Image: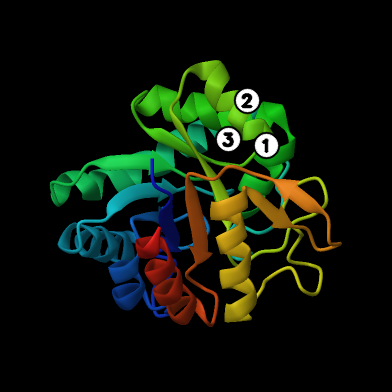
């Protein structure tokens, strides 16, 4: 399978606009749409799903911890039952708009702190996987390469897509460097393109300390709230077309 490009979209809320969704969506294969817990609202979800249909882009839910104030980037001490049911709730919200626009829901990708927690904590990863399966066992789970999410998806029998990040640095163990640290987010286009080429051609990425980390991504993510997201995404789109 060829490697796809995905982007987190629909992260505006009310009067607050985040990202350039109308342009970004033209250059990606699938989008992960916020479901209201970290960003997004019914108007934004409706508009983003409509855009995905217009540009024939696969739609996925992007569920989060209940952390609208912190944009879903703060860890919450939620029980596994809370996580499982919050996943079901958020998928259901986005699915309603997919039904409205007659477009299938394809995948689920956790957001922010929930994603990072699931990458290292098997119980959290299993709670997410169970929630997805309970809603629809045919949905794909987007997982960080080589993480606990891979094991959880396999355990419950979900299809999954291993994901790598174009604009984020990695620790030596293959996990994402926390946004709390300087340099966690990469803005230099040339560095990003060089890194993604190595991911595709060699199956490795260089950690923030210079160590080679093995990965085998099915999809590569660009964050829609990166201030250079459109420039990055356009160039990655061209790179992918060359492969």
Is 91 situated above or below 186?
above
Q: CA distance from mark 1 to mark 3?
A: 18 Å
The residue that label 1 is drawn on is 147
Is 89 situated above or below 184?
above
The numbered disc on residue 83 is 3
Q: Nearer the viewer, residue 183 or 125?
A: 183
Q: Residue at x 50, y 55 (%)?
A: 220
Which residue is at the far right?
A: 209
Where in the figure is residue 236, as x and y percent of width and height? Answer: 45, 69
The numbered disc on residue 151 is 2
Q: For this view, does 230 lie left or right of residue 182?
A: left
Q: Are marks 3 and 2 in contact (CB under 8 Å)?
A: no
Q: Secondary structure at mark 3?
A: helix
Q: Residue at x 14, y 52 (%)?
A: 101
Q: Are marks 2 and 1 in contact (CB under 8 Å)?
A: yes
Position of the C terminus, as image quadrant, is bottom left
């Amino acid at each position: 399978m060829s490697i796809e490009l995905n982007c987190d979209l629909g992260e505006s809320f009310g009067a607050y606009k985040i990202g350039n969704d109308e342009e970004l969506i033209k250059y990606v294969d699938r989008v992960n749409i916020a479901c209201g817990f970290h960003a997004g609202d019914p108007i934004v979800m409706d508009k983003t799903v409509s855009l995905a249909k217009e540009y024939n882009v696969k739609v996925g839910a992007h569920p989060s911890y209940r952390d609208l104030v912190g944009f879903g980037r703060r860890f919450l001490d939620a029980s596994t039952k809370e996580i499982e049911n919050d996943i079901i709730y958020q998928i259901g919200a986005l699915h309603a708009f997919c039904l409205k626009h007659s477009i299938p829901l394809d995948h689920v990708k956790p957001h922010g702190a929930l994603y990072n927690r699931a990458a290292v904590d098997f119980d959290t990863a299993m709670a997410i996987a169970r929630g997805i399966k309970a809603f629809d066992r045919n949905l794909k789970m987007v997982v960080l390469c080589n993480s606990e999410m891979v094991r959880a998806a396999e355990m419950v029998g979900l299809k999954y897509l291993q994901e790598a990040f174009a604009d984020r640095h990695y620790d030596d163990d293959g996990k994402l460097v926390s946004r709390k640290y300087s340099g966690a987010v990469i803005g230099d286009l040339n560095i990003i393109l060089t890194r993604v080429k190595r991911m595709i051609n060699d199956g490795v990425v260089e950690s923030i300390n210079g160590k080679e980390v093995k990965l085998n991504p099915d999809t590569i993510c660009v964050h829609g709230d990166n201030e250079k997201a459109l420039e990055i995404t356009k160039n990655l789109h061209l790179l992918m077309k060359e492969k």
